[in-house]
Amino acid sequence: MNARDEILARVRSALADVSPAVDVPSAPRVPDRGDLVALFVERVEDYRATVTRCTAEELASVVAGVLDGASAVVPPGLGLEVPGAVVDPSTGPHDGFSAAELDGLDAVVTRCRVGIAETGTIVLDHLPDQGRRAISLVPDLHVCIVEASQVVADVPDAIALLDPARALTWISGPSATSDIELDRVEGVHGPRTLHVVLVG
């Protein structure tokens, strides 16, 4: 018996007389809020982020306008041509551009997995259209493309769509913190500016 088997045997023994799991009640639901996309926009803007709405046909020109010539990195699966942007060459979470190289770029353009209307939160699960976590956390401007169809009512709805085995990044506005006197400082541990491009 190796150390792992011994530890697991001890855990099983300790749990032998524990009662079975209890039924967990359903998560409380928010009342119907009407237009979820409008609520999402309102809540995202409450966090001092900028939202630009556009059609799928306008997406490329809107993203180019937001970047306005800034140097940018994009994930390999973005599915959108961003003139002048470099593609992060990563094949896994620990390769690709270094933190110093990413810090030398002005912006990142990603997509997201889901947007939450009730909280104004965007969730990335780092599939190829979103890239690895580092590219969404180091550049100073994050341009995040959100499809209107990706907006759900609240956190339980989002959780149902997410794979708990994947790394998740939950974004509620630009990176910010405040001290005990509530002096807000932005850009401490992530992008100082969040620009959401809402498609549809």
Image (cartoon, grey):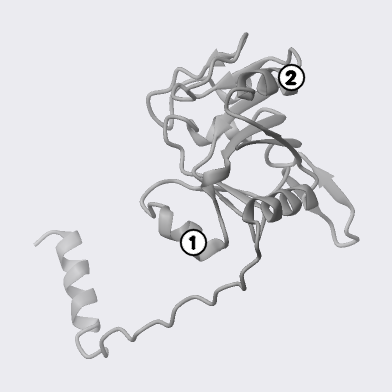
| Residue, disc 1 | 157
Spot occupied by residue 116 in the image (x, y as percentages of width and height): 59, 55
Q: Which corner quadrant of the image does residue 39 belong to?
A: bottom right
Q: Amino acid at mark 2?
A: Gly
Determine the residue positioned at 76% across, 42% down: 49
Task: Please tell me how crowded label 2 is: few (under 14), some (14-19), or many (20+) other residues with Cα within 10 Å.
Answer: few
Q: Judging from the image, what secondary structure is the residue with disc 1 in?
A: helix
In this view, the residue farthest toward the left is: 1
Report whether 6 appears left or right of 196. Answer: left
Task: Please tell me how crowded label 1 is: few (under 14), some (14-19), or many (20+) other residues with Cα within 10 Å.
Answer: some
Q: In the rendered view of the protein, which quadrant contains the C terminus?
A: top right
| Residue, disc 2 | 65
Report whether 90 appears left or right of 99. Answer: left
Determine the residue positioned at 73% across, 42% down: 174
Q: Which corner quadrant of the image does residue 194 belong to?
A: top right
Q: Is residue 30 above or below residue 190?
A: below
Kindly check if marks 1 and 2 are in contact, taking CB atoms under 8 A apart as contact. no
Spot occupied by residue 153 in the image (x, y as percentages of width and height): 57, 60
Report whether 94 appears left or right of 147. Answer: left
Sequence order check, earlier mark of 1 and 2? 2
Q: Is residue 20 above or below residue 92?
A: below
Q: Which corner quadrant of the image does residue 23 belong to?
A: bottom left
Q: CA distance from mark 1 to mark 2?
A: 32 Å
